[in-house]
Amino acid sequence: MNFKHFSLAALVAWALLAMNHVAAQVPSPAAQFSAGPPQGKLAPSGGRAVREATSVGASSALPTTAAESKSINDWLMRMHESSKNRAYIGTFVVSSGGGMSSAKIWHVCEGDQQVERVETLTGAPRSIFRHNDQVVTFMPDHKVVRSEKRVSMGMFPELLQSTDSRIADFYKVRQDGVERVAGVKANVIVLVPKDNMRFGYRVWTEQKKGLVVKLQTLDTDGKVLEQAAFSELQLDAPVKMDNLLQMMDKVEGYRIETPVLVKTTASAEGWVLKVPVAGFKPLSCYKRPATAANAAASEEPLQWIFSDGLASVSIFVESIDRQRHDKESSLSLGATQTMTRQLDAYWVTLVGEVPMATLRLFAGGLERKK
């Protein structure tokens, strides 16, 4: 699901781990692209992940019978609303691909305004601020600040990628008891895929209002691929929005980068997915600014994003560069799968928190229009 968009997604490289979900910038294997729109998972909102209404956010704890009677859409909407409307401070830990990373998060909301701050506690120091759809990432080691628009950071505890009611067509839900996480009582629910084209999720959702406090991504055999969980959590914390906004604006001494993503359509850029992948719908398509690595390319790199509402897949397309693109490959890192393929004069990188077989379907269906 989705903390991710590597630094989001980057798939996650999501750089802190396959979850650099925390840093929210771009898939590691596709690191030649700068961070971009949502992708990821850890987020119960991802974000990967997100990651939506009704009065599911009622403040009283749910009796077991009521919890069991809730539909998958009820559960997801409850989690989504709580991730947006709850003030909290917490430390979360992500375990993925044999590695571990952690970060501290401050989240506050006032009306329709949301502000968030994330500080990485492991790996390279990085501070990420989000004010609604404006995301500012501080990289102190390089004295660089990246400012960009992004609909979602794709980070834990966000989960839903979209509010598509068809999620119930591809996942079913069951309750798996009540447990405590970071001192908070949580209902445990399992989102079970109805086919082998997507992973499952075990989610711990705080009983009172539904905030996701722990999330596991499960492979097709039920094995845990990656986990994100709060180790410390203060709900309804006295976070001051003005203080976070002031910190977000302190860019003196930093070089400011403002990558501009140009919204487009795959069709307009000459691409088509000739065979749709069941459950996955295109969310958006962007042309990305050229980087030093692909500055000589004849066309700007393209990112095409798909989601089934929980899991997401990104297809990156760029002109082939014989010096950089010499060998097709596949890589698994926790729940994040990456695949590279040559297609005529283009180099295609696919990244997603889905089984490798699903990426192969996307790769096999991608076609350049004549």
Image (cartoon, rainbow, N blue to C red):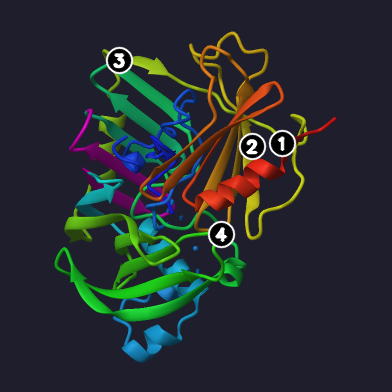
Say which residue appears at 57% left-offset and 27% top-offset.
261
Residue 47 seen in the figure = no
Residue 278 place in picture, x, y as percent: 66, 59
- Dot label at residue 266: 1
Side (left or right) of 284 relative to 274: left
User: Which image quarter holds the C terminus?
Assistant: top right
Judged from this view, the residue extending furthest toward the top is 296
Amino acid at the residue labelled 2: Cys
Side (left or right) of 241 relative to 11: left
Q: Pointer 3: residues within 10 angstroms few (<14), some, or many (20+)?
A: some
- Dot label at residue 25: none
* Circle nearer the N terminus (1, 2): 1
Side (left or right) of 180 relative to 209: left
Amino acid at the residue labelled 3: Tyr
**Does dot 2 land on a helix, a strand or a loop?**
strand
Say which residue appears at 66% left-offset and 24% top-offset.
346
Amino acid at the residue labelled 1: Ala
Q: Which residue is mark 4?
A: 197
* Circle nearer the N terminus (4, 2): 4
Q: Which residue is mark 3?
A: 254
Mark 3 touches mark 1? (CB < 8 Å): no
Name which quarter of the figure residue 45 lies in.
bottom left
Give how far apart the Cα atoms at labels 4 and 1 are: 23 Å
Residue 192 place in picture, x, y as percent: 46, 71
Magenta span covers which residues?
A: 100-124
Mark 1 touches mark 2? (CB < 8 Å): yes
Q: Which residue is mark 2?
A: 285
**Does dot 3 land on a helix, a strand or a loop?**
loop
Foreground tag (4 vs 1):
4
The answer to if 284 sits in the magenta stretch is no
